[in-house]
Amino acid sequence: MARRSVRMAIAAIATASMLIPLAACGGSGKATTDANGKPIVTIQVRRNVTDNPMKKTQFSKDLEAACDCTINWQEISDNAWGQQKSAKMAAGDFPDIGLALYDSTDVTKYSSQFEDMSKDLSKLPNVQKFFKAQPDAKKLAEDNGHLYLLPSDRGKGYRVSATHMFINKTWLDKLGLPVPTTWGELKTTLEAFKTKDPNGNGKADEVPMNIRGLGFGLWSPLTLMNSTGLTTSFMGASASSQGYYVKNGKVASYLTSNELKDTISYLHSLMAEGLIPKDALTRDASKYNSQTISDGKTAISGVTFGWSNYSEFGDKLADQYITLPPLKQKASDPDSQVKWDYSQPAAEYAYVLSLNPKTANKDAALKLINAMYSEKLSVSGFYGSIPDIVTDNGNHKYTIDKAKAYAEYPDTRAVALQDRFAGWIPDDVTIVNDTNAEQVTASDQAVRETIKKNVDPVKDVIPIWVHPSSEDMDTLSNNNTAIFNYTDNQLAKWVQKGGIDSEWSDYLKKVKEPTLGLDTNIKIWQKYYDKQA
């Protein structure tokens, strides 16, 4: 409150004969204790769905009991947070506890606004147990020994590659075709999908290969580079998602690799024959969805890239699709050359929780955080309150009530924090009816053997816990903007119109110009990669 408002409030309370004691106020003028003298802790959380307020849940009541405090929930939608975030940080407006609000870049810019929780670990025994059980999570969280952001771990059900390549097995069976194993076989299969009416409706409406766009991100067709011997890790703010990979200990850029050139050439050959929609790189996302989920009766898309077959095609069409095992570029290529997207750490863990060092009730806040990382409260934070939504069956087993959790939404976003939770679901926990985990785990089976045999998560990937400094992050970001301003248009043009062979040499000269900063970025990532190696 402003001072005038505080004086007015005091006067009003005095008029009411002082029946309720005045709550203590911190430096911001906000009350720090409730009417019963319990400390107030503010939690601000970014949520997908906010129509079931967290303050009304049993989960919130259980947290309050654990910290002997009152929680002031502030919920904000993704869109609203995107609009307000920069202004709030610049104004020094940080909540006591933030969930899914900040990332490591924010910490480097506003380090004084983030508690270094490495100093508080003695008061966070559940977090200590988490880090001991999951050392990769600790690596992700640590910043030169500091802990400014605590990660969440949603459990072994999400220890998966985030991208899978799906093919309509029903179509294959109808046409008497085998599951393709090479780029050449895939192209032959797509040609059959286009010309032989595999969905049987008498219309030439099949989309042989459907893609969302082009880029180094989730569900990109550029994951086909894994066929050429390069490993991708296309999720989050990874070095791979910025266009950098490592091979034999040396950092390089996909953008100047012959492997990318081959992949772009292959994608162009598919588009040139009408096997990929001509407008695939420019259309609205809704059109893509209309061709994957379709009308729920007749499948239209033959091959796509996505999270799980259910998330891609919906419940009614999902059973027609299987995950393609990673393809070889050529039949003569050795099995050991084939990789697949290694994004397991980013799929399982996430930067989530921040603590304001200036919070008035830090001890209560730390009790609250420790409670969040207990097993039961982690389960209820992610899936839904116990016993309202989830039943505790004992012996680390929990069952989600499908009727309550999934009645209105395809996951538990409305009744829980879901991926915005802070907590740790240990590997010995069994969750029954987690349809999302069950579906993506099933989709992941076809790529696991390749990843296990052929992908080294340190030697073939720049791990997501490699943290450049604030200054170097600024350099990387500025250079990447200049680089992608040039390369995005060029790669899209080659997929749509061709010409990569004749223009490749000039392209390499342009993208390697010192003014774009590609070599500088490679040196930065090499420096930090070498530190963790």
Image: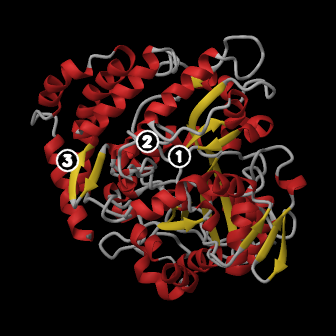
Query: What's the distance in space between the residues labelled 3 and 1, CA to CA?
Result: 26 Å
Q: Earlier in the sequence, mark 1 or mark 2?
A: 1
Query: Which of the 4 image quadrants contains residue 105?
Result: bottom left
Label 1 crowd (10 A; few <14 / some 14-19 / many >=20): many
Question: The disc labelled 3 sits on which kind of residue?
Answer: Asn
Question: The disc labelled 2 sits on which kind of residue?
Answer: Thr
Left or right: 75 as drawn, with respect to 275:
right
Residue 175 seen in render: yes
Left or right: 271 as drawn, with respect to 456:
right
Under circle 3, the secondary element is helix
Query: What's the distance in space between the residues labelled 1 and 2, CA to CA?
Result: 8 Å
Disc 2: which residue: 223
In percent of width and height, residue 136 lies at 44, 72
> Which one is nearer the viewer's eye here, 377 or 357?
377
Under circle 1, the secondary element is loop
Q: Residue furthest left?
A: 514
Whether 153 is drawn above or below 164: the answer is below
Disc 1: which residue: 163
Under circle 2, the secondary element is helix
In percent of width and height, residue 233 lies at 41, 51
Color encoding of the figure = secondary structure
In the picture, the quarter occupied by the N terminus is bottom right
